[in-house]
Image (tube, helix red, strand yellow):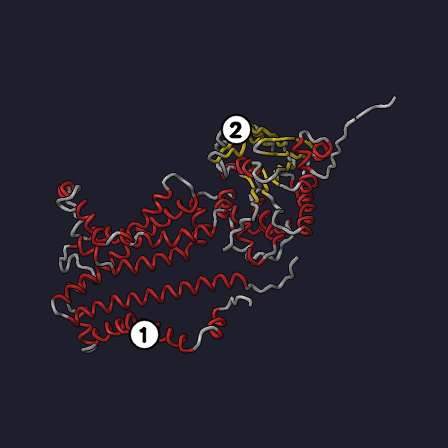
């Protein structure tokens, strides 16, 4: 399912988080919103999810306007930066939450949760509390929980931000594979250009509440559209020279 | 020298013994004079003439019986009102930034700083016969002042800060993320509250309710003003204690006082139990047998 963002603006007091942002996410794609902190990427993600309301502009899922729909009606899967697992519930109940609030029967819940825990490779962890899991395991529980009710869109807010480098590397690879398997339109927020380039098939570079460039990872890397993108994407040596005289 | 983080250690090698013992004895003396002797004395005076007399003092007198009953109606009603208000108010203050938030925070503390007598008077001036709403209430056959509703109203006012004050730091510590996660997973407001918010704050709520209840049962000043002191109708336990004392019925007065003291001690025990339960729950969550290795 595709997502269309049209002319979205959002202010917090005197701070402009987003100004006239427009964006298309194609169906089944994996898009990364890349930018420094304060660039508005997380706000945009929350507006797409329905956890935040825009001051101005329109959000479409496919051809259906959802701007004023609640997160519940939009049926999105959202993974929070610090997972936000329910601390008093065990892994099973965390994953089952979206099914329970939708009134699924116990048998169906058990089946679906088992399926999801296999998908995120956490069978046997049903009875654990979130506090008894490692960071990578919590991340995978959060993903399973977000996917439980078969959301139309999967939204990830800095999903690997709180993990150490090695686990992060593994999870990125795994997320790519997972995306290939479930084919759910996915938007990922990150401040790490390497992550964006490695995982996503399209990258959106944001700065100060505006979009600087949209393109494939290769485009953004090889042909940065603005000085900011060139600088932010990094690993670029800039040589400045001046021709004093030419011979011949 | 490294600063010691262990208070026991610094106490052991720090001050000379006369200082240590002197301070300890002073603390014990203060505690004895201010707390232990008076509390023990209440029970001593109450039971001084035997259990039979005690029993008769408590339940032989219809007015005393009614006072006990009335307190058992007024205090829980006030606590219930403050529970609902407290949770809603703490929620608003901890979760949202809105104009007037600082004013609301200050207003919540007002009942603590206003003298209870003044609080009672405020309600008399509002709902009493000479008050603004007095004539209207009289015309409609409603009685608030010198009746049970007035007692509940003033008690709720005086004990208003307990639950809110207890809950705001709890809610701020828990944070809004889990609530948001519940919403993003399709929960409606009630589902979010009962399945996610409530389990995270319930210990704080119970704790606030217990403190609130202790204060509500013992409230004297504000209730004194609005009750009108009608024996067998609007006398609560603290008012009854005072009245019996004024009538030179010392054993009767102490008998009622002993019940109040007993309720206070029971409250303390309950509070301690709650704290232990909470700690236990956290410990249990952390010490689940780790049979599988970490990834």
Q: Is residue B58 above or below residue A146?
A: below
Indicate left or right for B45 with A101 as reference. Answer: left
Residue A85: x and y, percent?
54, 50
Q: Residue furthest top?
A: A248
Q: Residue at x 50, y 55 (%)?
A: A88
Q: Chain of mark 1?
A: B
Q: Secondary structure at mark 1?
A: helix
Label 1 neighbour load within 10 Å: few <14, some 14-19, many 20+: few
Of residues B136 and B187, the one nearer the viewer is B136
Residue A162: x and y, percent?
60, 49
Q: How far is the residue under mark 1 from the one under mark 2?
A: 72 Å
Of residues A197 and A26, the one nearer the viewer is A197
Of residues A137 and B223, the one nearer the viewer is B223
Indicate left or right for B235 with A86 as reference. Answer: left
Residue A67: x and y, percent?
50, 31
Q: Residue at x 42, y 78 (%)?
A: B17
Label 2 neighbour load within 10 Å: few <14, some 14-19, many 20+: some
Which part of the image, by quadrant, shows the C terminus of chain B?
bottom right
- Residue B270 appears in the figure: yes
Q: Residue furthest right?
A: A248
Q: Secondary structure at mark 2?
A: strand
| 1 or 2: mark nearer the eye | 1
Q: Is residue B189 above or below residue B39?
A: above
- Residue A108 appears in the figure: no
Which part of the image, by quadrant, shows the N terminus of chain B?
bottom right
Kindly identify which residue carries mark 1: B29
Mark carried by residue A58: 2
Q: Residue furthest front?
A: A244
Residue A33: x and y, percent?
62, 37
| Quadrant of residue B126 within the rendered picture | top left
């Amino acid at each position: 399912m595709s997502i269309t963002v049209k002319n979205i603006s959002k202010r917090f007091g005197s701070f402009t988080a987003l100004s006239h942002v427009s964006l298309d996410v194609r169906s089944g794609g994996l898009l990364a919103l890349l930018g420094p902190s304060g660039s508005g990427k997380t706000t945009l993600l929350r507006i797409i999810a329905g956890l935040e309301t825009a001051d101005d502009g329109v959000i479409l899922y496919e051809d259906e306007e959802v701007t004023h729909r609640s997160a519940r009606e939009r049926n999105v899967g959202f993974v929070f930066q610090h997972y936000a697992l329910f601390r008093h519930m065990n892994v099973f109940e965390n994953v089952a939450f979206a099914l329970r609030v939708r009134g699924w029967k116990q048998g169906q819940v058990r089946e679906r949760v088992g399926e999801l825990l296999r998908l995120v490779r956490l069978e046997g962890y049903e009875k654990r509390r979130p506090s008894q899991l490692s960071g990578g395991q919590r991340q995978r529980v959060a993903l399973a929980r977000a996917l439980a009710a078969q959301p139309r869109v999967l939204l990830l807010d800095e999903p690997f931000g709180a993990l150490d480098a090695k686990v992060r590397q593994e999870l990125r690879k795994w997320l790519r594979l997972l995306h290939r398997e479930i084919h759910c339109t996915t938007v990922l927020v990150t401040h790490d250009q390497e992550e964006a380039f490695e995982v996503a098939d399209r990258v959106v570079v944001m700065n100060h509440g505006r979009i600087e460039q949209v393109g494939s990872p290769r485009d953004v890397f090889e042909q940065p559209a603005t000085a900011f993108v060139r600088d932010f994407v990094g690993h670029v040596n800039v040589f400045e020279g001046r021709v004093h005289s030419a011979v011949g | 020298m490294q600063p010691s983080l262990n208070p026991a250690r610094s106490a052991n090698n720090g001050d000379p013994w006369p200082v240590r013992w002197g301070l300890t004895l002073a603390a014990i003396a203060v505690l004895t004079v201010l707390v232990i002797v008076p509390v023990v004395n209440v029970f001593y005076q109450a039971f001084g003439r035997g259990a039979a007399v005690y029993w008769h003092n408590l339940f032989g007198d219809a007015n005393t019986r009614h006072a006990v009953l009335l307190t058992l109606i007024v205090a829980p009603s006030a606590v219930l009102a403050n529970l609902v208000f407290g949770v809603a108010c703490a929620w608003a203050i901890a979760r949202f930034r809105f104009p007037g938030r600082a004013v609301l925070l200050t207003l919540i503390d007002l009942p603590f700083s206003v003298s209870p007598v003044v609080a009672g008077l405020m309600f008399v001036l509002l709902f009493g016969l000479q008050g603004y709403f007095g004539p209207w209430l009289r015309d409609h056959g409603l009685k608030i002042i010198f009746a049970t509703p007035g007692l509940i109203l003033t008690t709720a006012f005086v004990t208003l800060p307990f639950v809110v004050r207890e809950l705001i730091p709890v809610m701020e510590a828990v944070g809004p993320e889990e609530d948001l996660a519940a919403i993003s997973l399709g929960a409606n407001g009630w589902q979010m509250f009962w399945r996610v918010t409530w389990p995270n704050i319930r210990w704080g709520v119970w704790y606030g309710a217990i403190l609130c209840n202790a204060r509500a049962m013992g409230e004297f000043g504000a209730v004194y003003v609005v009750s009108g002191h009608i024996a067998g109708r609007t006398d609560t336990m603290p008012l009854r204690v005072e009245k019996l004392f004024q009538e030179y019925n010392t054993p009767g007065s102490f008998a009622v006082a002993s019940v109040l003291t007993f309720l206070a001690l029971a409250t303390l025990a309950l509070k301690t139990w709650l704290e232990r339960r909470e700690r236990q729950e956290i410990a249990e969550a952390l010490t689940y047998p780790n049979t599988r290795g970490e990834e």
